[in-house]
């Protein structure tokens, strides 16, 4: 199949490489000319601008957008849409809030342009093992892109989950669960790191990969990290978030659904970014004020 592809970051480049291995014709664009050249080395066709990319595609065109979420994605989709024609399709494979998908799909439908949202999971390992794709959009548009989805995903690794926005909604919940799983592992391994038994944490993580009910790919990654650095001394405990956890909590509040595990995991990430917590200073001050308890200056 023929596909335009915008955004050649870590995931985008690997996705293009995987598409080329399956002989899809891929026309690429990125702000970095070096990345375009790298993709050309994989057999992709480079372009000098969005207009040039569109001109090298045959109607009905399909353009996959894989750029940072938020304003970059919005601006790119609007710019591409202005160059496309009725019957063409835009795919957003980034991390977009599902409300934006619903709005974009409605706006583009007025122009006769199809919109597909593809929640994409797999990270930097996707090139090797494939990407789990959660796809939202109209049946006909999704069906036409099926060869692309089959190439990018492992066997049984993609699904059309619903109308516009459904793909990114499912991906949002996926990431919220991911936050919670990682937090559970983090707390358990911290406790074991302080055990009097001087446990080999890498060995424990590897052990749990064999028949344990807590085995997972995340645990496999944990085992690898601990083998490289048993005490994780090369890392700082500073943890970012990409937004989906916040969106999921907002959606849960709207629907009166309790998500305490995710909420704790997200707030723990916030705490990790503080050198010192004002709240904890306040706790120390209050204990000192009412009970004369000692404080550290």
Image: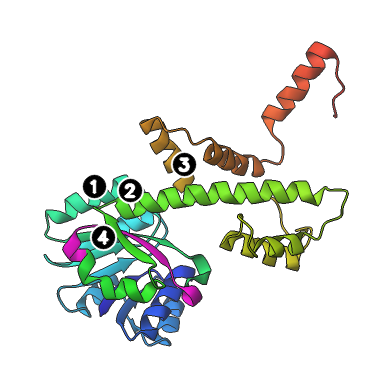
Query: Which residue is depicted at the point 25% across and 79% down?
Result: 2
The circle drawn on residue 116 is: 4
x and y, in percent, of residue 127 in the image:
47, 75
How far apart in space, not on screen, are marks 4 and 1 (Cα)? 12 Å
| Closer-to-camera residue (221/207) | 207
> Which label's residue is closer to the chain start, 3 or 4?
4
Q: Quadrant of the C terminus?
A: top right
Query: Which residue is depicted at the point 21% across and 62% down?
Result: 81
Q: Could you tell me how many numbered marks the image carries?
A: 4
> Label 1: which residue?
103
What span is in magenta? 127-141
Q: Is residue 251 above or below residue 4?
A: above
> Label 3: which residue?
246
x and y, in percent, of residue 67 in the image:
39, 62
Q: Secondary structure at mark 3?
A: helix
* Label 2 CA crowd tier, 10 Å (few <14, some 14–19, many 20+): many
> Which label's residue is closer to the chain start, 4 or 2?
2
Q: Secondary structure at mark 1?
A: helix
How far apart in space, not on screen, are marks 3 and 2 (Cα)? 13 Å
> Which label's residue is closer to the chain start, 2 or 1?
2
| Closer-to-camera residue (27/141) | 141
């Amino acid at each position: 199949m023929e596909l335009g592809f915008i955004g050649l970051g870590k995931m985008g480049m690997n996705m293009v490489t995987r598409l080329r291995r399956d002989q899809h014709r891929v026309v690429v664009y990125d702000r970095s000319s070096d990345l375009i050249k790298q993709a050309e080395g994989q057999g992709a066709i480079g372009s000098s601008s969005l207009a040039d990319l569109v001109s090298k595609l045959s109607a009905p065109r399909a353009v996959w957008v894989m750029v940072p979420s938020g304003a970059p994605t919005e601006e790119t989709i609007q710019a591409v849409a202005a160059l496309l024609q009725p019957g063409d399709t835009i795919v957003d494979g980034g991390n977009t809030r599902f409300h934006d998908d619903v709005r974009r799909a409605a706006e583009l439908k007025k122009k006769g342009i199809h919109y597909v949202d593809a929640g994409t999971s797999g990270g930097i390992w996707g090139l090797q093992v494939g990407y789990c794709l959660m796809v939202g959009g109209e049946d006909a548009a999704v069906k036409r892109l099926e060869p692309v989805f089959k190439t990018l995903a492992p066997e049984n690794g993609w699904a059309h989950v619903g109308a516009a926005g459904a793909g990114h909604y499912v991906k949002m919940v996926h990431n919220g669960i991911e936050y919670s799983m990682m937090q559970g592992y983090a707390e358990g391994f911290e406790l074991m790191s302080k055990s009097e038994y001087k446990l080999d944490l890498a060995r424990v993580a590897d052990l749990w990969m064999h028949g344990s009910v807590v085995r997972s790919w995340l645990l496999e990654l944990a085992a690898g990290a601990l083998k490289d650095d048993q005490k994780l001394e090369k890392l700082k405990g500073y943890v970012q978030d990409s937004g989906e956890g916040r969106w999921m909590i907002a959606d849960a509040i709207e629907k009166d659904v309790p998500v305490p595990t995710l909420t704790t995991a997200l707030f723990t990430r916030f705490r990790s970014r503080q050198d010192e917590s004002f709240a904890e200073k306040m706790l120390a001050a209050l204990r000192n004020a009412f009970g004369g308890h000692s404080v550290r200056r």
